[in-house]
Amino acid sequence: MRAIVVNTPGGSAALEPAEIPDPVPGPGEVLVDVAASGVNFIDVYHREGRYPLPVPFVPGSEGAGTVTAVGEGVSDVVVGDRVGWAQVLGSYAAKAVIPAEQTIVLPSGVSPDLAAAVLLQGLTAHYLTHSTYAVRQGDDVLVHAAAGGMGLLLTQIAKLRGARVIGTVSTPEKEKLARQAGADEVIGYEDFADEVKKITGGGAHVVYDGVGAATFDGSLTSLRPRGMLALYGAASGAVPPFDPQRLNAAGSVFLTRPSLTHYVADREELLWRAGDVLGWVASGALKVHVSQRYPLAEARRAHDDLEARRTTGKLLLIP
Ligand SMILES: NC(=O)c1ccc[n+]([C@@H]2O[C@H](COP(=O)([O-])OP(=O)(O)OC[C@H]3O[C@@H](n4cnc5c(N)ncnc54)[C@H](OP(=O)(O)O)[C@@H]3O)[C@@H](O)[C@H]2O)c1
């Protein structure tokens, strides 16, 4: 089958198109013909070796397609089912073996293409807005990189929960997209903490920060007393070590560094979050903005574009 393989971690050249043997589903697993694989920032961290993995490996953590075979002991997923998944390595490929426990059977009205575009980031936006900090009606919410894959979903879901959303973006095109997603105020990164304080009159209840090093200090000072900084990523680089006393100085604020793994602790939690997200997609309450589809063999270009901040919304690889 066609796949992308990483033999030596590094820059985007580490993503090598290759022909490799078809995977075979073991007990509890299913084989899927992949319709689309989602591109995520974590794929960059895996590729670079920032999150080290044994080599060689097929990168990619998200996708969707049609089940073509099931392993021993699988009863709740059958051949022909359309399924999606998040957090299963090996998704940049024409076929993937997925633990049945990790599959999400797609409701009618959600194509595999859409599922591959929304699952990983949608589950993340769901736990951030429902569990890490449960957004309430009237809350002031700051979303960084509001036109990105995560940002557009966070903005929409925070709006569904009744928040006032302030988004940061780097270009006028991104500003337009963030506004279309429902952001009430869209600002640049320069002096954003002052802007947020001015708009809210006291600071944000929560800051969702996936940008990391470049925004961390401003994110802390954007909070109102007892607000929460959910530092959920590091697109601009890792945040250096810091003194907890700064949380006191910022107003007894909370800092958390959450990860999807710990918020889909079991199948029940996965199905709850996925059910909400795919339900909103099917009803039209949540719009998924797929900005670019790349042939699988051009995974390098997708990573280059993502890392250079040239993208908006979601990127897909099509095998
Ligand atoms: N913890 C979790 O559970 C979890 C799960 C999924 C994703 N994430 C994290 O969420 C973040 C966003 O992921 P995504 O896939 O949706 O990407 P994305 O937001 O579509 O792309 C990254 C965006 O970050 C902004 N950015 C600011 N400074 C940057 C820099 N120096 N380099 C690159 N980008 C920069 C850019 O938007 P502007 O040009 O508007 O600034 C860029 O478009 C990542 O940090 C990722 O690791 C975390």
Image (spheres, grey):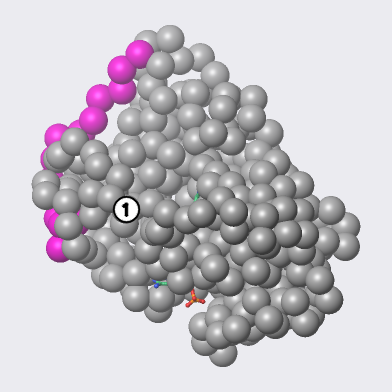
Residue 93 visible at all: no
For residue 23: magenta? yes
Q: Quadrant of the image for the N terminus?
A: top left
Using residue 27 as the reference point, say whether residue 247 is left or right of it. Answer: right
- Please give the name of the residue rendered at 31% of the width and 23% of the height, measured from the top-left corner: 25
- Residue 227: quadrant of the picture: bottom right
| Residue 259 drawn at (x, y percent) | 51, 42
Q: Which residues are magenta?
A: 13-27
Disc 1 secondary structure class: helix
Is 35 drawn above or below residue 156 in the view shown?
above
- Please give the name of the residue rendered at 48% of the width and 50% of the height, measured from the top-left corner: 116
| Residue 176 drawn at (x, y percent) | 63, 84
Using residue 24 as the reference point, say whether residue 7 is left or right of it. Answer: left
| Residue 184 drawn at (x, y percent) | 77, 77
- Please give the name of the residue rendered at 33% of the width and 39% of the height, measured from the top-left corner: 89
- Please give the name of the residue rendered at 77% of the width and 59% of the height, measured from the top-left corner: 225
State the residue lying farthest toward the top: 73
| Residue 83 drawn at (x, y percent) | 50, 37
Question: Looking at numbered disc 1 in the image, what kind of residue is underneath it?
Answer: Tyr
State the residue lying farthest toward the bottom: 172
Disc 1 packing (10 Å; few <14; some 14–19; many ≥20) = some
Judging depth in this view, the residue of 251 and 148 nearest the camera is: 251
Residue 24 visible at all: yes
Judging depth in this view, the residue of 77 and 104 nearest the camera is: 104
Disc 1: residue Cβ within 8 A of ligand 1's nearest atom: yes
**Residue holding disc 1:** 45
Magenta segment's dominant SS is loop
